[in-house]
Image (spheres, grey):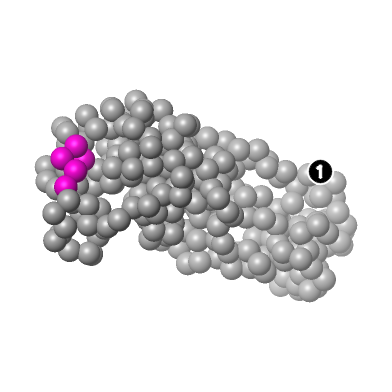
C-alpha cells in the first residue's frame, strides 16, 4: 500500500489522525521511509505534523490553515501522549458561548507546563493544573469526534486563576457576566476546594461586579469558612488601596470595568 492509499483509506472511514509508526506498519516500510513519504504529502499540504510522530490529514477546506483546527486533533494528540487534558480558559468560554471574540491561541489545560504548539496558523497554549483530572468537564462534539471542555464552573475558576492569560480583569469580568447564567451556585462551591482559596475570593468579587450576584451565595459561605486573610485582587500591585470587600476578604487594588 502507498502512503496516498493509506491516507485515503483512513479518511474514508472518518479517521484523520495517525502516527508515523502506524503508517510504516500499514505501507510495509521502515520508519525512515514512512517519514519520507509523509514529508512528501506534507509538502503538498495534504498532511500536517503538529507534533513529532503524530500526523493529521488536512481536508481541502483547511489547507489555508495548514492543519486541522485544534479542537479536531487535540483529543487524539492527548491520547497519543497519554495526557489528561481539557479545553480551558478563553477557548472553553467560547465553546460555552461566553466569549466576544475567538482567542488567538487555543488554550488547553494539562498537568504540567508544555511549550507552545505552533503549526501553520494554529497556536495551542498549554496551561498547567496539577489536578487536571479532578476538574469537572463536559463533552462537545466536533466533526472528528468529541473534545473535553472544562465545565462552566471549572472555566470560571480558571479564568480568574490565569487572568493574565485572559486579557485582564475587565475582560474576565465581561466573560463572567455572560457565563453566569450557566453557573450552578452549589457546584461553584463544591469545586472551590480544588483551587487556591484566593481564586474563590477573586471569582466571587468579579462575579458580583459583573452582575452575577444570584450565583455567589454558596461560594461566599465557602470563602467565609476557608479564607484566613485578605488578599489583593491584582497581584503584584501592592496593598495600598483602602477599598475592601469584607464579603470576599479582598483588597480591591484594581479597577474592574466589565463591558456589560
Residue shown at 86% from the left, 61% from the top = 4
Seen from the viewer's position, the closer of residues 45 and 63 is: 63
Rendered location of residue 45, percent (x, y): 79, 68
Q: Nearer the viewer, residue 111 or 247?
A: 247
On whether residue 86 falls in the magenta region, the answer is no
Residue 251 image point, x, y percent: 18, 51
Q: In this orientation, which residue lies closer to the viewer: 64 or 8? A: 64
**Position of residue 157 in the picture relative to residue 23 (left or right):** left
Residue named by callout 1: 13
Q: Position of residue 19 (x, y in %)?
A: 67, 58
Whether residue 79 is visible to the viewer of this picture, yes or no, is: no
SS at mark 1 in the image = loop
Q: Nearer the viewer, residue 244 or 162?
A: 244
Q: Main secondary structure of the magenta part?
A: loop
Instruction: Determine whether 160 is above or below 241 in the image.
Output: above
Above-or-below relation of 236 to 163: below
Which quadrant of the rendered structure holds the N terminus? bottom right
Tell me which residue sits at (27%, 57%) in the image: 254
- The answer to whether residue 197 is left or right of residue 103 is left
How many numbered circles are shown? Answer: 1
Instruction: Please state the extent of the stretch shown in magenta in the rendering.
Output: 244-248
Q: Residue at x 28, y 27 (%)?
A: 218
- Residue positioned 51% across, 55% down in the render: 107
Mark 1 packing: few (<14 Cα in 10 Å), some, or many (20+)? few
Q: Position of residue 30 (x, y in %)?
A: 74, 68
Amino acid at each position: 500500500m502507498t502512503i496516498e492509499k493509506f491516507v485515503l483509506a483512513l479518511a474514508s472511514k472518518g479517521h484523520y489522525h495517525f502516527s508515523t509508526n502506524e503508517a510504516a506498519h500499514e505501507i510495509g516500510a521502515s520508519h525512515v521511509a514512512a517519514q519520507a513519504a509523509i514529508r512528501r504529502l506534507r509538502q503538498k499540504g495534504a498532511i500536517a505534523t503538529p507534533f513529532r510522530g503524530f500526523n493529521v490529514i488536512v481536508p481541502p477546506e483547511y489547507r489555508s490553515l495548514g492543519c486541522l483546527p485544534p479542537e479536531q486533533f487535540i483529543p487524539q494528540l492527548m491520547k497519543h501522549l497519554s495526557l489528561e487534558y481539557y479545553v480551558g480558559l478563553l477557548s472553553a468560554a467560547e465553546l460555552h458561548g461566553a466569549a466576544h471574540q475567538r482567542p488567538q491561541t487555543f488554550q488547553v489545560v494539562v498537568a504540567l507546563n508544555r511549550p507552545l504548539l505552533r503549526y501553520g496558523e494554529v497556536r495551542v497554549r498549554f496551561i498547567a493544573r496539577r489536578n487536571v483530572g479532578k476538574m469537572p468537564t463536559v463533552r462537545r462534539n466536533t466533526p472528528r469526534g468529541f473534545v473535553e471542555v472544562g465545565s462552566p464552573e471549572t472555566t470560571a475558576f480558571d479564568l480568574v486563576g490565569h487572568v493574565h492569560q485572559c486579557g485582564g480583569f475587565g475582560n474576565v469580568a465581561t466573560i463572567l457576566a455572560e457565563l453566569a447564567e450557566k453557573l450552578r451556585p452549589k457546584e461553584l462551591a463544591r469545586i472551590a476546594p480544588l483551587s487556591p482559596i484566593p481564586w474563590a475570593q477573586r471569582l466571587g468579587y468579579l462575579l458580583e461586579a459583573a452582575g452575577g450576584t444570584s450565583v455567589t451565595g454558596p461560594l461566599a459561605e465557602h470563602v467565609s469558612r476557608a479564607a484566613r486573610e485578605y488578599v489583593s485582587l491584582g497581584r503584584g500591585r501592592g496593598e495600598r488601596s483602602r477599598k475592601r470587600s469584607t464579603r470576599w476578604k479582598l483588597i480591591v487594588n484594581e479597577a474592574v470595568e466589565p463591558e456589560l
